[in-house]
Image (cartoon, rainbow, N blue to C red):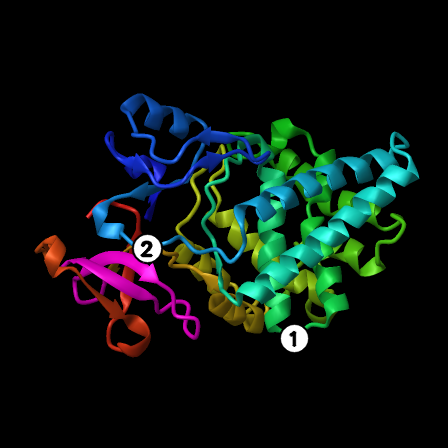
């Protein structure tokens, strides 16, 4: 099975696993044969990746470390939390419902944390959950997963992981107060519209700071996740040690997921391009220690992705190296302009081949 960008799916390709929406409803069953009409429809709905089955990818399993059912449950709980907290602050929701919602977010973080610890795997960036109108909630869960994984690697205590995990899941709750017409605008935002979007950090802080049973650190995750080390961020323009440590970690996860996600107004970057964005800001925007750890924690070359090596060979990622996530095992399908027959296909482990590097990563057919 291989991950393929929707623009590179061909009529006749076979779907490798079901496509679901963010409520868990199956939109397309495994085994469906793609037609031009179906591909066009998925493009219109802003799908990014699907999984394709063919004989060259036998035995390659997309990894995540997190079950799709757990992701979907987390998305549903985040959606409920956003609406309940916003409703409570506006006086439309009673405290009992709010307390139940907060409990569900606590459980979600505990479940996600346990899944990450149990699997002891790096987290794959690819998910074929249909996002479209649910981007805010899917993004929040992705940021939560990345953040929990980083906090776990940093040796945070269970209490700290729970705090930062909740903060990450709720970091964008202030966008509930930003008009959808601005959040989903297909064109460049005007200066005035951008100022409205920036207000989501303050909105989020005000929504969270007085919620019962939420530690105060969580509201700072919403308030400061757009602050930058050199003071160029917002809303306060604070720098360095004045920024809460949780917010510094969430900033790395937030930016990576934002730039690699498809939106109505642009296509997402490839994963390695997203990592380059983080590294380009690691001397002034982000804490380099966290960017380095992110690289070791997140699979930027997920199983099934097409890659080109520096010696001209091309193939697909077959499996991961736990010790060096950006040095995976590659199944070679083409050897310097010569496509290999099935019996000639072989694999190379980049973690023990220091002179061989990945020079390109894309989803174009070989």
Q: Which residue is mark 1?
A: 155
Q: Secondary structure at mark 1?
A: loop
Choose between 123 and 275: the one closer to the eye.
123
Which residue: 66% across, 39% down? 76
Q: Relative to 132, does residue 100 appear above or below in the rendering?
A: below
Q: Outermost residue toward the top? A: 37
Which residue: 32% across, 36% down? 7
Residue 166 point in image, percent of width and height: 73, 54
Q: Quadrant of residue 75?
A: top right
Circle 1 packing at 10 Å, graded few (<14), some (14-19), many (20+), is: few
For the magenta stretch, what is the residue range? 309-335
Residue 297 vs residue 225: left or right?
A: left
Residue 326 point in image, percent of width and height: 39, 67
Choose between 169 and 223: the one closer to the eye.
169
Residue 23 point in image, percent of width and height: 59, 34
Q: Relative to 128, does residue 353 appear above or below in the rendering?
A: below
Which residue: 24% across, 69% down? 348
Residue 191 vs residue 268: left or right?
A: right
Foreground: disc 2 or disc 1:
2
Residue 278 point in image, percent of width and height: 50, 61
Q: Which residue is mark 2?
A: 60
Q: Which mark is residue 33?
A: none
């Amino acid at each position: 099975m291989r991950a393929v960008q929707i623009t590179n799916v061909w009529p006749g390709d076979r779907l490798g696993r079901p496509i679901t929406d963010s409520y868990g409803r199956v939109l397309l069953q495994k085994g469906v044969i793609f037609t031009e009409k179906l591909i066009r429809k998925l493009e219109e709905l802003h799908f990014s990746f699907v999984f394709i089955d063919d004989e060259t990818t036998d035995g390659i399993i997309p990894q995540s470390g997190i079950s799709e059912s757990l992701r979907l449950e987390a998305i549903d709980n985040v959606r409920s939390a956003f609406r309940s907290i916003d409703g409570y602050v506006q006086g439309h929701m009673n405290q009992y419902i709010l307390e139940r919602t907060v409990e569900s977010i606590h459980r979600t973080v505990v479940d996600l944390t346990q899944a990450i610890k149990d699997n002891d795997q790096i987290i794959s960036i690819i998910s074929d959950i249909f996002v479209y109108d649910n981007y805010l909630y899917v993004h929040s869960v992705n940021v939560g997963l990345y953040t929990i994984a980083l906090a776990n690697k940093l040796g945070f205590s269970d209490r700290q992981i729970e705090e930062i995990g909740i903060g990450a899941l709720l970091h964008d709750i202030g966008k509930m107060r930003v008009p959808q017409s601005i959040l989903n605008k297909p064109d460049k935002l005007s200066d005035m519209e951008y100022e409205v979007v920036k207000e989501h950090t303050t909105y989020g802080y005000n929504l969270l700071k007085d919620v019962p049973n939420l530690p105060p650190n969580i509201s700072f995750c919403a308030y400061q996740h757009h602050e930058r080390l050199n003071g160029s961020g917002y809303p306060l323009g604070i720098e360095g040690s004045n920024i809460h440590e949780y917010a510094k970690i969430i900033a790395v996860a937030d930016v990576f997921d934002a730039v690699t996600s498809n939106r109505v107004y642009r296509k997402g970057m490839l994963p390695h391009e997203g990592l380059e964005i983080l590294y380009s800001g690691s001397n002034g925007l982000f804490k380099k220690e966290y960017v380095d750890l992110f690289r070791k924690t997140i699979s930027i070359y997920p199983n099934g992705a097409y890659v080109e090596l520096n010696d001209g060979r091309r193939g697909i990622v077959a499996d991961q190296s736990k010790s060096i996530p950006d040095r995976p095992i590659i199944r070679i399908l083409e050897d310097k302009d010569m496509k290999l027959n099935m019996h000639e296909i072989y694999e190379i482990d980049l973690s023990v081949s220091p002179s061989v590097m990945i020079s390109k990563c894309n989803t174009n057919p070989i």
